[in-house]
Image: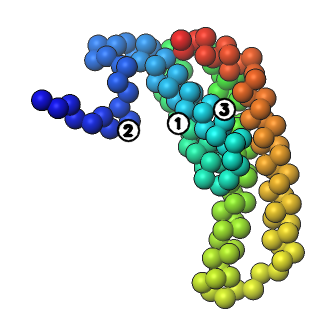
Amino acid sequence: MTMAKPKKWEISDIKKRATVCSAAKIILRIRLDFLVKAIEIYFENKNMENLHNVRIALRRVRYNMELFIVCFERKLFLRFYKKIENLQNHSGFVRDLDMFKKNMNELITNENVRISKTIFSKVDKKRKNLENSLELVLMKFLLSKSLKEFYKQIT
């Protein structure tokens, strides 16, 4: 008899009779590991797709944290949650400019709209500044005391 392939949202480490809080630790550890890996991949190749994957990983960590706040010491938990929220905001600013530029290019290609090169230049400059800021907060996050403390709570 063959086992059915698990769905992408299924987490095999969780046993059927696990408590919510023990399951929360497993889920958050997996989500956080995925986030750290996504950030590392982003630093290896800073492209739109890898930034998008960081954003997905941040959302998964943040929204799972919101479900399980009752399982953790509130003060440490909220300190870490605010860091995730801050990273999500920073990455969103960069991603928004990527999408803005993509939409402008589609208007040029599909609708024959004329857009000044100055606008593209300003968008690129703003994006580079925001990306530099994002990279700094991502590096600080990876080296942060709150990340280490949160990992201690979930292992």
Amino acid tagged 3: Ile
Which residue corresponds to mark 1? Answer: 60
Neighbour tally class for label 2: few under 14, some 14-19, many 20 plus, Cα within 10 Å: few
Q: Nearer the viewer, residue 40 or 62?
A: 40
Which residue corresponds to mark 3? Answer: 84
Amino acid tagged 1: Arg
Q: Residue at x 60, y 84 (%)?
A: 110
Instruction: Please provide percent x and percent y for residue 6.
Output: 30, 34
* 150 displayed left or right of 137: left
Amino acid tagged 2: Lys
Upstream in the sequence, badge 1 or badge 2? Answer: 2
* 139 displayed left or right of 57: right
Distance between the Cα atoms at labels 1 and 3? 10 Å
Q: Quadrant of residue 4?
A: top left
Secondary element under disc 3, as helix, strand or loop, is: helix
Say which quadrant the N terminus sits in. top left
